[in-house]
Structures are given as structure tokens and as C-alpha cells.
Amino acid sequence: MPGSNVAEPTAELTYTISELAAEFGVTARAIRFYEDKKMLEPERNGMSRVYGRRDRGRLRLILRGKRLGFSLSDIGEMLDLYDPNDAKQEQLKIILGKSLARLRALEQQRRDIDELILELRDNCGQISDLIAGNYAPQIRDP
Amino acid sequence: MPGSNVAEPTAELTYTISELAAEFGVTARAIRFYEDKKMLEPERNGMSRVYGRRDRGRLRLILRGKRLGFSLSDIGEMLDLYDPNDAKQEQLKIILGKSLARLRALEQQRRDIDELILELRDNCGQISDLIAGNYAPQIRDP
DNA sequence: ATGATACTTTACGTTAACGTAAACGTCAAT
DNA sequence: ATTGACGTTTACGTTAACGTAAAGTATCAT
């Protein structure tokens, strides 16, 4: 029975490298590369890598960061921000500072996106009008 | 008097390459590189490049795209989407299609950002608590 | 006319983020 | 025991997006 053994906490669901690769649509090479960059640190079953919940979560964050255009070293920092495991008071303040800086960057990025979306939507409207047969208005103010 | 000369439209304010470079905080090299990639096409005064309002606007879009993590070729496409100058009916539909695809991508990216911001904010809160002296709750559900 | 300054082209160098090939280990099934 | 299927390491290749150095041109001030 699961849970009957008190000495066994939660039986940790694990993943192989190709499972993760398939799930997230990346190559195993990439995942190993992230490990090389100290962004993941899977267990080993003999020779093979064994990924747990934590590594899976980290991989998700890595890929999300990539979609947002961050560099791996940037993402590496952000990952560290996520688990202030054993940090001393002084460390914590530094981490908090970096986190806040990241927040600023992300909020700026949000504004960029919103602007782009608005402009693109507007543009789509104009194109639709053109297709619909309207003679183009050609309004262009700075 | 400005506007008294009918033959002269608006006297076009122009910029040199280093003006633009300074204004946007990039190098002249980068700007020339974008031209190489057909993303800008400044006039020439003899040998020197002369940028007008349009190129300046395009440069803004390029850099905004970069901040959002798009590749230059992606951005190149997006730029084309912005001026369906002399497109035929069939072209317009293609452009509209690509524009809508871009919109989807951007909206996805917006969701990514919002998630990240939320998580980071939450994290900042926890760190602040730690600094404030609270004994860490250690709540972690998948 | 001579620097100083700002612009140009050409071309090779660099970094990040993997791709790809080679060469090998391991285990299950045939 | 050999053939896949999957895993591993090592190492070299590739692409994007410029950096940087070299060498020349144009303009302006002294």
C-alpha cells in the first residue's frame, strides 16, 4: 500500500531525460547543457540521470525564461532567486535586491509587449479594411 | 513661415547615425548591421547616411523587438507587416495571416510574463518575511 | 596643410546556445 | 550473442548578432 511505510516520505515521482525532453519539446542535448551550466542537478541511477519534481520545475522556468528572451546566465540568476534555501541575512538582502531588479525588467517588458500588441492589432485592422476593399485612408501622425 | 512653400512638404527632420546611436543607446555598428539585414534603408548625403522619421521609427521597433527576445529575422518580418505599402490582394491576406500569428505569439508571451511576475512577487514577499525575522513556513505544493 | 573629428567599407574575431558526430555502456528482447 | 533502444561523454561545428581593428574619405578648425 502506498503511504503505509512511514520511513518513505512520498515516493518521489521521477523522470528520465527523454521524458522531460519530449514533454517540453526540447532535445536531451539541451537539457544536459543546462546541467553543464549548473541550472539542473539530477540524481544518478548508475550512469543515467534521474530528474525529480524540483528539476522539472526548474526546467519549466528555464524554458519560460527563454521564451521571454532572457540569456541562460540571466535565467540562472533567476533560478537562484527562487530558492533562498540556506541564505544568511546579508545574502537575503542581495537576493531581494536582484529580485526587485528582475521585477522592474519584467514590468518594462510587459509594457513593451502591450504596446506592440496594440500597434499590431491596429495594423491588422487597417489591413482588414484594405482587403475589404476600402481605399486606404493613409493617416500617419507621429 | 513654415508651410508657406507648397512645394516643400514638411522639411523632414533627419538624423545622423551617431545621433540615433546615442539616442537609443546602441552602437553605429549595430545600426549599420540592421541596414545590412535590409531592416533600414537610410538616404545618403554623399557618403554619409541620413536617417528620417521612418527609419527612426523602425529602429525603435527593432530595439523593442530585441528587448522582447525576438530574432532579427523575426523582427524583419514584423517590420514588413507594418507597411503593406504596395501589396496586392493576395499579399495582404498573407500579411494578415502572419500578423495574426504574431499576435498569438505576443499574447502567449504576455501570459508568460504575467506568470513570472506573479511568482517573483510572491517570492519577494517570502524573502521579505525571512528578512523580517519570521521563521520560514516552507509551504510547497506542486 | 594639418590634425581632429566623424563618417565609411572590409574583414576577421567573439560569445551564446546548442547541433551533430563519434565512440562507448547497459539492458531487454529476439 | 547480437540487435536495438536508450543512455553516456568528448569534442568539434554552426548560427546569430554584433565587436573590433585596419585603412581610407570628407569636413571643419586651427
Image (cartoon, coloured by chain):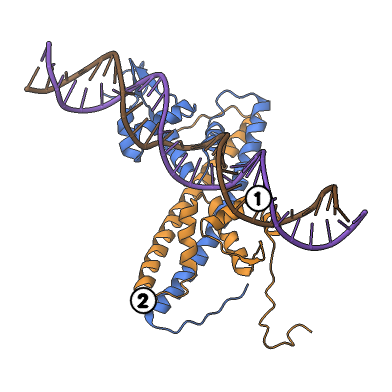
Chain colours: A orange, B blue, C purple, D brown
Give the secondary structure at mark 1. loop
**Residue type pointed to by label 1:** Thr
Q: Is D9 above or below relative to D22? A: below
Return the x and y of residue B30 as percentages of the image width and height: 40, 33
Of residues A89 and B115, the one drawn nearer to the viewer in this rendering: A89
Q: At x 59% / y 27%, what residue is drawn?
A: A135
The residue beneath circle 2 is A89
Return the x and y of residue B135 as percentages of the image width and height: 45, 84
For mark 2, name the chain: A
Q: Is A28 above or below relative to A100? A: above
Crowd around label 1: few <14 · some 14–19 · many ≥20 (10 Å):
some
Q: At x 59% / y 68%, what residue is drawn?
A: A54
Return the x and y of residue A121 as percentages of the image width and height: 57, 43
Q: Is A43 above or below relative to B48? A: below
Residue B125 appears in the picture as rendered? yes
* Quadrant position of the C terminus of chain B in the picture: bottom right
Of residues A130 and D5, the one drawn nearer to the viewer in this rendering: D5
Return the x and y of residue B91 as percentages of the image width and height: 65, 27
For mark 1, name the chain: A
* Quadrant position of the N terminus of chain B in the picture: top left
Give the secondary structure at mark 2. helix
**Residue type pointed to by label 2:** Gln
Q: Is B124 above or below relative to B86? A: below
**Mark 1 or mark 2, which has the lower sequence index?**
1
The residue beneath circle 1 is A27
